Image (spheres, coloured by chain):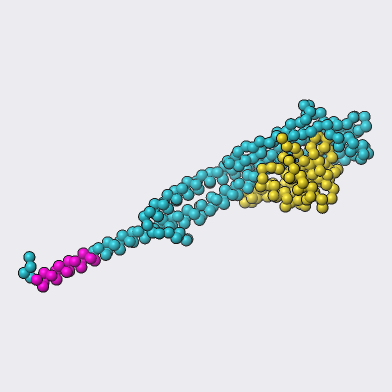
Amino acid sequence: MVKIAVLGDTESIKGFAAVGLDIYPCDKDSDAEEIFSKVVTADYGIIYVTERLVPTLKRQIDKTDKQLTPSVVPIVGVSGNNGTGTAALKAAVEKAVGSDIIFNK
Amino acid sequence: MAVLNVNTTRMELTRLKKQLSTALKGHKLLKDKRDELMRQFLDMIRETKTLREQVEEGLNTVNSDFVLASSVMSKEALDTALLAPKQEVYLEQSTRNVMSVDIPIYHINTRTAEESDIFSYGFASTSFELDDAVSGLSELLPLMLELAEKEKSVKLMADDIEKTRRRVNALEHVLIPRYQETIHFISMKLEENERSSRARLMKVKDMMIEQQIEYKHTHPDAV
């Protein structure tokens, strides 16, 4: 039995605490790597990360992509969508098919 | 193409022929695996795409609800209301095997039996926008879970497709042609050996006949 973590700026992730997920507030981008590495080694099955932090954590997230757990999923925060969520899927399609045939609009 | 560095013997030839048939079998199997994985991958990625759009839309609504709530309530009141959760979510993980790729399956368990038992605050001191936001979020949770499951599967499958494709290509364009050429090379060499030994034998026979004729000339009265 594992739990679910949410990583991001306080404003965006506050609500997830109410529905029972573990939240890890991270308002400064410079703290992100440290907090993320702590969360990855802890026993979490899914880690939701707000899209704003994804570029900072790119290297660490890529490392988890090869493993079965944890599953790192970018979500939109209050600061809006910057497309990093679909970018990961796009990369997967490019890797598998050779060129992007799903998201190229 | 490069011919393998082998002895040109019959034994080597049979060994290589055996390896070639294994390689051909493996190539066919891997190719089938790649095609099937690709088909499942494309289905999965289409589902993931729509799911992600749904989740993003949902989260945007929830976020704007939260912003509304925080504009009505003070920050402290909002924090007190949210940060002492009543509900806790546990994740149960299992895996499913798709063409030898393990993909995760998630299932959530909540601490309290009633899944909708999410409001960790009294209704008197909080605004109704907050209720909307929290219930919206809890409705979104199963979708987010499915999204996590699908995104992970997509990534793992993409990895495996790439790996399988490399193997198929290596077999198809390197290993199999190399075996075929080496087999051709060895059988040519063996035929050549055979011809040369036959030529040698014929030569020897000619020489023997010549010797006999010469002997008959020098000893005409021999029987």
Quadrant location of residue B186? Answer: bottom left
Q: Is the magenta region chiefly helix, strand or loop?
A: helix
The hue used for chain B is cyan
Q: Residue lying furthest left in this view? A: B221
Q: Residue lying furthest top in this view? A: B113
Q: Is residue B84 visible?
A: yes
Q: Residue at x 73, y 33 (%)?
A: B108
Q: Residue A2 vs residue B12: left or right?
A: right
Quadrant location of residue B146? Answer: top right
Q: Is residue B40 visible?
A: no
Depth order, front residue of B131/B211: B211
Q: Is residue B53 magenta?
A: no
Q: Residue at x 76, y 44 (%)?
A: A39
Residue A9: horizontal and vertical position, in percent? 83, 45
Q: Which residues are magenta?
A: B203-219
Q: Quadrant of the C terminus of chain B?
A: bottom left
Q: Residue lying furthest bottom in this view? A: B218
Q: Residue B117 vs residue B206: left or right?
A: right
Q: Is residue B212 magenta?
A: yes
The hue used for chain A is yellow
Q: Residue at x 64, y 50 (%)?
A: A95
Residue A101 drawn above or below residue B81: below
Residue B30: horizontal and vertical position, in percent? 53, 46
Depth order, front residue of A100/B188: B188
Residue B88: horizontal and vertical position, in percent? 79, 33
Q: Residue B192 vs residue B112: left or right?
A: left
Residue B112 drawn above or below residue B53: above
Residue A40: horizontal and vertical position, in percent? 74, 45
Q: Residue at x 86, y 43 (%)?
A: A11
Residue B210 drawn above or below residue B125: below
Q: How many marks?
A: 0
